[in-house]
């Protein structure tokens, strides 16, 4: 049943918003209120960047994650609450723990303890009793700090009892101080992580804005280039049409000019011929007029002579 349930959850894909909603809802329903720290999208993206969660595909709203990742998110949040654990410790730990163990720890069915926080005999007894302890790794600096804590030797006798009681009170005060310091460290660590998440989110948003702006500029440039290319093609077509019309006009003018030259040559010949005919006609007419004048003069002379003869 567990195997089939894990397979089904692996096949169910959720976007980031749905995934975080289920993780936070499970956290609120299962954990004590004091332990609940909601997981934001900025925190989720920061974990992805740090390698705590496997990156899936490209960035964007379309990225899907398996539903089985809900328990892993809560497990990472539980490990973060352990102040001695760095991101590297958490990354190493989650790769060595199986999903069923993670589920039991998240559902509070199994305790989450650092091995070096437990007495070796108690740890051995719990393991022999069948409890599966999560193998967490602690920073070397923290281990060294815990090994080097100075515990003064106590004297024997009555004074030793008072000194031991006083030492117990001092140790309790130191423990409370250390607890407050650890709490402050946890708060500082949480605030630091949130600040890193906000910075990461701002960078992510800035990258998205830059990518969108570049995409819009490229798209606008492509549209402008396509429009200019189309307008240039239309201008070329118009120029080609005008060139063809101009060539046709030149051919027409040449044809008209040739016809005009032929007509002018023909007209010139006709005018020359008419001038020659007019000269001939004028010459003939002049001769006829001169002949008529001569005949008229002879007629008048003869008529005058006839009248003179009759008068005599």
Image (tube, rainbow, N blue to C red):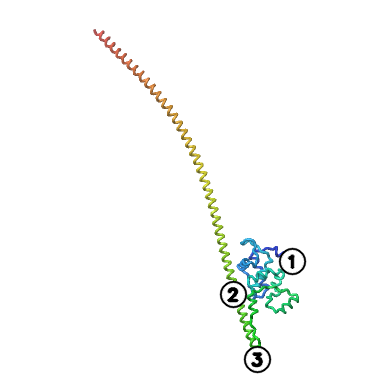
Sequence order check, earlier mark of 3 and 1:
1
Most extreme residue toward the left is: 312
Q: Which residue lies at the image location 71% right of the left edge and 78% below the top edge?
A: 120
Q: Is residue 218 above or below residue 307?
A: below
Q: Give left or right: position of 267 versus 229.
A: left
* Numbered disc in front, either 2 or 1: 2
Q: Which mark is residue 123?
A: none
Residue marked by disc 3:
159
Residue 25 visible within the image:
no
Sequence order check, earlier mark of 2 and 3:
3
Callout 1: 10 Å neighbours few (<14), some, many (20+)?
few
Picture quarter containing residue 135? bottom right
Residue marked by disc 1:
3
Q: Is residue 62 above or below residue 159?
A: above
Callout 2: 10 Å neighbours few (<14), some, many (20+)?
few
Q: Give left or right: position of 218 versus 143.
A: left
Spatial distance from mark 2 to mark 1, Cα to Cα? 40 Å
Picture quarter containing residue 127? bottom right
Picture quarter containing residue 157? bottom right
Q: Which residue lies at the image location 73% right of the left edge and 73% below the top edge?
A: 132
Q: Which mark is residue 188?
A: 2
């Amino acid at each position: 049943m567990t195997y089939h349930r894990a397979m089904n959850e692996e096949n169910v894909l959720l976007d980031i918003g749905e995934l975080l909603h289920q993780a936070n809802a499970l956290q609120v329903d299962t954990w004590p209120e004091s332990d609940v720290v909601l997981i934001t999208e900025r925190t989720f993206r920061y974990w992805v960047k740090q390698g705590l969660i496997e990156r899936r595909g490209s960035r964007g709203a379309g990225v899907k994650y398996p539903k089985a990742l809900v328990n892993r998110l809560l497990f990472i949040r539980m490990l973060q609450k352990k102040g001695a654990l760095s991101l590297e410790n958490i990354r190493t730990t989650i790769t060595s723990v199986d999903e069923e163990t993670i589920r039991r720890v998240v559902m509070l069915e199994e305790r989450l303890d650092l091995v070096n926080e437990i007495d070796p005999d108690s740890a051995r007894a719990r393991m022999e009793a069948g409890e599966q302890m999560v193998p967490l790794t602690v920073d070397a600096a923290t281990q060294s700090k815990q090994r080097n804590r100075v515990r003064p030797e106590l004297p024997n006798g009555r004074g030793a009892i008072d000194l031991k009681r006083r030492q117990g009170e001092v140790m309790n005060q130191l423990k409370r101080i250390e607890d407050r310091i650890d709490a402050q460290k946890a708060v500082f660590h949480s605030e630091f992580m949130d600040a890193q998440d906000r910075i990461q989110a701002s960078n992510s948003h800035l990258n998205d804005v830059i990518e969108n702006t570049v995409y819009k500029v490229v798209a606008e440039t492509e549209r402008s280039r396509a429009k200019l290319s189309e307008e240039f093609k239309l201008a070329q077509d118009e120029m080609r049409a005008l060139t063809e019309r101009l060539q046709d006009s030149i051919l027409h003018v040449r044809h008209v000019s040739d016809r005009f030259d032929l007509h002018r040559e023909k007209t010139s010949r006709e005018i020359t011929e008419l001038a020659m005919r007019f000269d001939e006609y004028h010459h003939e007419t002049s001769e006829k007029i001169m002949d008529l004048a001569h005949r008229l003069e002879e007629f008048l002379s003869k008529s005058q002579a006839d009248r003179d003869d009759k008068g005599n």
